[in-house]
Amino acid sequence: LEHEFLQTTGDQAVRLLEPLYRCDLRAAAKAVTVPVRGLDTDLHPHAADINRKYFADYDHVTIAGFGHYPMLECPDPFTSALRSLLGRTTA
């Protein structure tokens, strides 16, 4: 994945990301009618309380001690956390 990022020019990145800054993400989130689940690490703060304001059914799990790509850095803890999260969704 890092190789792909390094191949992207700044101009390409701006064109790819620009639509995200034009979209009303709050309105889009409020329109979501399915459960939304997040799986992250403690690398960056996670605003679960804010997500719960906009998604009707939101839950998340945080894996401590890993970076931006937990599925690559710690596949076993990632898979375990994902299964736990999905199990709570269907219960």
Image (tube, rainbow, N blue to C red):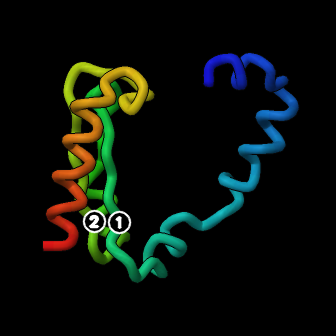
Residue 82, placed above or below residue 63: below
Q: List the residue tagged with mark 2.
A: 58
Give how far apart the Cα atoms at labels 2 and 1 are: 5 Å
Q: Amino acid at mark 2?
A: Tyr
Residue 89, placed above or below residue 6: below
Query: Residue drawn 27% across and 65% down?
Result: 58
User: SS of the residue at dot 2?
Assistant: strand
Q: List the residue tagged with mark 1.
A: 36
Residue 91, which numbered label?
none
User: SS of the residue at dot 1?
Assistant: strand
In front here: 79 or 32? 79
Query: Residue drawn 20% across and 41% down?
Result: 80
> Mark 2 or 1 closer to N-term?
1
Query: Residue drawn 12% across and 73% down?
Result: 91
Residue 71, placed above or below residue 67: below
- Residue 18 % position (x, y): 75, 48
In front here: 25 or 13? 13
In front here: 75 or 43? 75
Q: Quadrant of the N terminus?
A: top right
Horizontal side of 85 relative to 24 (left or right) equals left
In front here: 18 or 36? 36
Please tell me how crowded label 2 is: few (under 14), some (14-19), or many (20+) other residues with Cα within 10 Å: some
The quadrant where residue 12 appears: top right
- Residue 49 % position (x, y): 23, 57
Q: Amino acid at mark 1?
A: Val
The quadrant where residue 8 appears: top right
Horizontal side of 67 relative to 15 (left or right) equals left
- Residue 79 % position (x, y): 27, 40
Please tell me how crowded label 1 is: few (under 14), some (14-19), or many (20+) other residues with Cα within 10 Å: some
CB contact under 8 Å: marks 2 and 1: yes
- Residue 7 % position (x, y): 80, 20
Query: Residue drawn 25% across and 30% down?
Result: 76
